[in-house]
Amino acid sequence: MFHLEEGGPGPRVYLRPMESVHIPLKYQTFLCDHTADLQGPSFLPTGRTPQVAKKNPSNIIAAKTIKVTFKAEDGKPMAICQVNVEPTPHVVDQAFRLYHPERCFLKKAIRLPPWDNPAVSDSDARTHFSVRCSDPNVTCQTRMTAPGEPQDVYLKVPGGASPHVKMFFVLVFTDKWMAAPSQIWQIYVHFLERVDMSCVSGQRTCQALILRGKKDILKLRCFSSHPQEIQLDSDGVFVLPPVAMQELQLKVQPWRAGIRFLFVNAVDVEHRRLVAAWLLCLNIQQPVLSKAFEVCVAVGGGRGSSRKITYTNPYTCSRTFLLRSDHPDLLQFKEDKFQIGGGESYSIGLRFAPSQSPGSVEILVYVNNMEEKTEETFCMKVKYS
């Protein structure tokens, strides 16, 4: 139907007198607007005409007008078709939120699920995978693998300053013509200021974070991803003066050894926007164990078990101690706080929760002082049988 000539302005079609023909048009682009969705009843999408924009109120991508010209052999236009392109929001199959230190390249591999292509009858044939990214600054690619092997999508995202959030789309195609995506991913990359800390499990560690003021007075409130392990000196709303620096004191008390990543955000409560974000990288060490005990708890019955262990005050004066556990759901104390004189002994009452299935678990009991510094650590090896 169409004839293509090298160096020609476009495809040609030959028509008989009074003959009509349908001309198919194909429009495809991988670029889109990456701004956040605006909220509010007064928001009107941007378009060339109000009629185009009002057709899709949720559209945040600018509509455009494309002119298609049909010319005769002498070059004179026979018809001009105006095509209004109205981009619509993607139907997202999966959304990912990734967290990374600021001003660093994020390199991430996302594994694709097993894919069954109904167009391929041979089970040993490979499905043709290709990916495209809506952000030209993001490197996105995949490699062909042998049949049966997992397929990965590799991303390389340039980092921005904290608390910048980068959003883009990844389109996964399973046909070599890339006619329609099989999956669409929406990926958010949060860039945060990195803070490295070395801690001991069960013991409190203090850390100061720096807040830098903007041009105006800000009313801020801080939030953490793990409020059971992070305490802030200012739990409520506080004022940050313009062009000022203020220290935010954190008290971190993790309960499990290993490498952990926690998040702290400072939010402007009036304008509801993120002002600062930190990524706490914790290297948590196991405490030195003073004693180990073995406890047997009967399975079923819903009764649990009670035990007592003795603790002696190593100081010559009276002290107050706090009891902590890394498994508060499995172990409770008769008293979470006790005071004993110098050189005296105290019986710590333990109550183990019942279990409906056999197994074993190790529970650490921390004896801390009033500053949450660990004095001694006991290991309770509980066997449910």
Image (cartoon, rainbow, N blue to C red):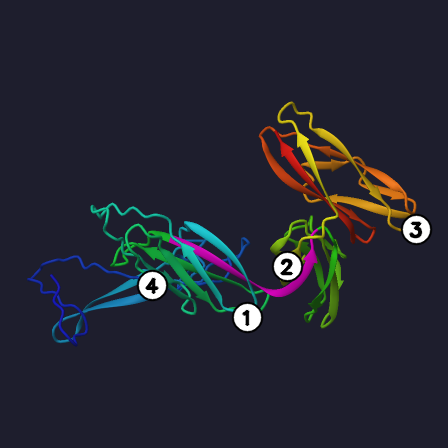
Image coordinates of residue 57 in percent, x first then y, are 45, 53
Q: Which of marks 4 and 2 is nearer the N terminus?
A: 4
For the view shown, which residue lies furthest in the left direction? Answer: 16
Three-letter amino acid code of the residue under disc 1: Arg
Image coordinates of residue 120 in percent, x first then y, are 22, 48
Look at the numbered disc 1 and give the secondary structure of its residue. Answer: loop
Instruction: Tell me the magenta residue range.
Output: 184-201
Distance between the alpha carbons at the discs numbered 3 and 1: 53 Å
Between tags 3 and 2, which lies in front? 3
Between tags 4 and 3, which lies in front? 3
State if disc 3 and disc 4 touch (CB < 8 Å). Answer: no
Q: Name the residue under label 2.
A: 283
Q: In this view of the protein, which residue sits in the foreground, 368 or 80?
A: 368
**Left or right side of 79 for 283:** right
**Left or right side of 141 for 11:** left
Mark number for residue 316?
A: 3
Q: Residues within 10 Å of mark 3 (few under 14, many from 20)?
A: few
Mark number for residue 103?
A: 1
Between tags 2 and 1, which lies in front? 2
Q: Name the residue under label 4.
A: 29
**How many badges with numbers are in the image?**
4
| Quadrant of residue 53 within the rendered picture | bottom left
Q: Earlier in the sequence, mark 3 or mark 2?
A: 2
Distance between the alpha carbons at the discs numbered 4 and 3: 77 Å
Look at the numbered disc 3 and give the secondary structure of its residue. Answer: loop
Tell me if I can see residue 344 in this picture.
yes
Three-letter amino acid code of the residue under disc 4: Thr
Look at the numbered disc 4 and give the secondary structure of its residue. Answer: loop
